[in-house]
Amino acid sequence: MKKVFCLVLSLLMLMAAPVYAEEQTAQATVTYTCEDNFYIEIPETIAVGEICYINAVEVNISPNKSVYVDLMINPNSYVTIYNEADESQSLDVYFQREDGTALSVTDLNLACFQSGSSGTSQSFTTYINDDMTGKMAGQYSGVAMFSIHCD
Amino acid sequence: MTKKEKRVFAFLVIIIIVLAYILLSIGFKSPNKSGILLENEGREKVLNQSISIFGFSELHMKSGELNQSFDFRNPNTNDCYMDIALLLSDGTKLFEIKRIEPGYGIKEVQLNNVLENGDYLNCCFNVQCFSLKDDMQLNGASMSVDLYVR
């Protein structure tokens, strides 16, 4: 009979242990900061005289922030493109926002996207002020650099 | 076994059964499985002849280490290679990676120099794009990024 008692009590002790562990509960606060990130589409090339678009594909940013897309232009407010056959021949390309205002060194912003503006687009156009008389015929091309910042 | 012993034995068996029931009903629950599908490169291109650029405003890196985690993707909707480079505000180039194909990304970079603890504000993250057809340079972007090293 003593053996049976010992066996039963041993079993009870084994089973009591997990019950005790189960009661040891604690609470922890789990925090995670999701950093601002976004996908912005810019045009591959700038076609003079045509409407270009900047698109916010995905804007996952804090509600109090915006994604600004500026254009890096030279101090005279234009981007220079060059004749592909003769790089000494160039044209100055100016930029105009969709509200009709021209881009200048003091105001470089082309587009601004708020949180939740995924799928929206803003446009701009380009134009040339140069007198084309005497300009070499042919294709002119250049690269525009956009400055993107989230503030 | 005497009658008394039998009663005690039966009592103990009942206690064991009750305890087992309690344990099975409130304990030993398997944890819920959880998981997050991270990869999502299938987003549609909204504009034709455009370049989709992945942007961010902050970076976090470890001090005293050359190898750093760094997440950047060239979406598979793009028709261009991407060259990327991260520069401190004084122009020091931390790393540069050339010709990332569409649909490919970066998970880790090797810095040119180890960084000490500190906030490196207004770093410049450059993205230059090149045509898949003829390697002609296309429009690109430069991002202002704050780098926090701990």
Image (tube, helix red, strand yellow):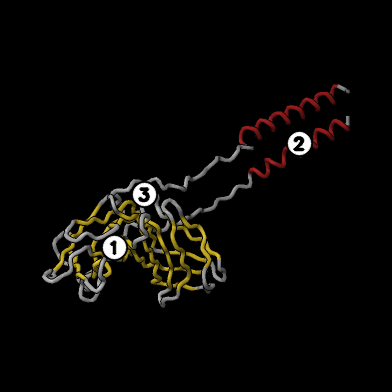
Q: Chain of mark 2?
A: A
Quarter of the image with the N terminus of chain B is: top right
**Residue B80 image position (x, y, % from top left):** 37, 56
Give the structural element (helix, strand or loop) at label 3: loop
Residue highlighted by disc 2: A12
Q: Select label 1 or label 2 by which is in front.
A: 1
Could you tell whether A134 is left or right of A47 in the image? Answer: left
Amino acid beneath label 3? Thr
Residue highlighted by disc 1: A68
Residue highlighted by disc 3: B77
Could you tell whether B79 is left or right of B12 in the image? Answer: left
Q: Residues within 10 Å of mark 3 (few under 14, many from 20)?
A: some
Task: Indicate the quadrant where residue A39 lies.
Answer: bottom left
Query: Which sits in the foreground, B20 or B52?
Result: B52
Amino acid beneath label 2? Leu
Q: Distance of mark 1 from mark 2, alpha carbons?
A: 68 Å
Q: Residues within 10 Å of mark 1 (few under 14, many from 20)?
A: some
Q: Earlier in the sequence, mark 1 or mark 2?
A: 2
Q: Select label 1 or label 3 by which is in front.
A: 3
Could you tell whether A35 is left or right of A128 in the image? Answer: right
Q: Distance of mark 3 from mark 2, alpha carbons?
A: 64 Å
Q: Are callouts 1 and 2 both on one chain?
A: yes
Q: Is residue B3 visible?
A: yes
Give the structural element (helix, strand or loop) at label 2: helix
